[in-house]
Image (spheres, helix red, strand yellow):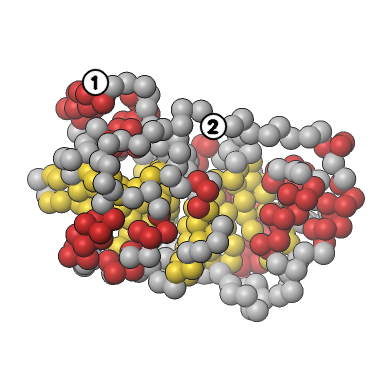
Amino acid sequence: MSSTMDLKSRYAELKATQPHTYLRNAAAELGVSEMELLCTQLGDGVTRLTDDPKVILKDVPQLGRVMALTRNNDVVHERKGSYKNPTLEGHVGLFVGADIDLRIFWSHWASAFAVEERSQTGTRQSLQFFDPKGTAVHKIYLLEESDTDAFARLVAKHKAADQNAPQVALTSPAPRPEMPDAAVDAAGLQQGWLALKDTHDFYMLLRDFRVSRTQALRLAPKGNYAVPVSPSALRATLNAASSEQVPIMIFVGNPGMIQIHSGTVTNIVDARGWLNVLDPELNVHIREEAISAAWIVRKPTTDGMVTALECYDAEGEQIIQLFGARKPGIPELETWRNLVATVEKEHLL
C-alpha cells in the first residue's frame, strides 16, 4: 500500500492532468481502493464517521430530498428522493419509499465518511460508505433543496474520534467455484422453482441447492422459465418501456446494497460508450459491453408469474435486473408481459 503522502501527491498530479476524473476511476488508475484515495483528503473536506452505518442512516431522513447512488463495476443507479420508512435492524436493512427503495446487507459495510468537494461552482456534500476492501457500497449526495444544517449536525454527531484512515482488507475470499452441473440435484432444484411462492425465496433455493444464479438458470424447469437472449435485449426492453410508458422496476446492486427504481423511464441516451436513462429523478448508466449473458426469467408466486430480464457479466455476477412495476398482492402488468414476450421473440439466442 502506498504511503498516504506519496498517494496524495500522485493523486494531485493525476487531478492536474485529468481535472474531471471520477474518484473511482482515479483510484483504479493509481492502483488503490476508492476509500484509500478519499482518505488522502482527511481533514481537508473529508471527515471520517463512526463505523456503525445503522446509527448514521437513522439520521439521513433529516436531510430531506437527496440523491442516492448505488453502483457495481458496470452500472450506476442514481435516484432522487427522500429516505423514508427505515427498518435498520437485523441482517438486512430497508428504506421503502416511492423514490428511495433500498435493501441493505450490513455484513459488507465497514466505514463511512462525510465529504465536501469544493469547486468553482460551489460545494458538493455527500455521505459515502465503503466495504472492507475500500470499495464504495453506497453514496448519498445533497441537492440544492437538501437541509445542509441537518447535514452539519449529522457530521458533528457521528464524527469519529479517530480521524486516521481505517485499515483496508487487501484480499477477499476467493469465490466458491460452481459444482459441476451433473452433480446438482437438478430435479429437486426444478421442483423447488415450480413451488416458489415469492420471488424473494429464490435466494434460499440457490443456497439450498448450492448453485449460482447462472447455474440455476441453465438448470431451470423445462419451458420458458429461463430463456437466454442477446445482451441487446436490455436496450430493447428499455426502449420499449420508454416508448410504451410501461412502468418498470430497475434493480442495481453490489454485495452490500440493492437500489430499486419503480416507475416509468423516458429518455434513453447513448453517451461515451454507456447506455443511459437520463430522467429528472432517475439516472442509470450502463456499460453495455460488459453484459456477457442475458436471460428472461419467470418465477411462480402467489400473485401469479413474475417476469424479469437479468443481465450478467463474464464472471456470472448480476449487474442489472428489470421487472414490471408491481406491489405484493397485485399481479404482474400484462403490458410488461407482452413487452417482454416481444423482446424474447426478437432477441432469442
Residue 103 x %, y %: 51, 59
| Dot placed on the residue nearer the N-terminal end, 2 or 1 | 1
Q: Residue at x 55, y 61 (%)?
A: 90
> From the image, which quarter does the N terminus lie in?
top left
Pointer 2: what residue? 172
Q: Residue at x 33, y 24 (%)?
A: 30
Q: Residue at x 64, y 46 (%)?
A: 294
Find the distance from the CA under tag 2 to the CA under tag 1.
Answer: 25 Å
Residue 58, numbered label: none
Seen in the picture, residue 76 relative to 148 is either above or below; the reply is above
Say which element carries label 1: helix
Seen in the picture, residue 343 relative to 255 is either above or below; the reply is below
Label 1 Cα crowd, 10 Å radius (few <14 / some 14-19 / many 20+): few
Q: Residue at x 35, y 36 (%)?
A: 166
Q: Is residue 248 left or right of residue 62?
A: right
> From the image, which quarter does the C terminus lie in?
top right
Q: How many dots with numbers?
A: 2
Q: Is residue 129 left or right of residue 262?
A: left
Q: Give the residue at the far bottom of this rendering.
A: 329
Residue type at the position of mark 2: Ser
Say which element carries label 2: loop
Q: Is residue 99 left or right of residue 326?
A: left
Pointer 1: what residue? 6
Q: Give the residue at the far right of this rendering.
A: 187
Residue 277 x %, y %: 41, 55
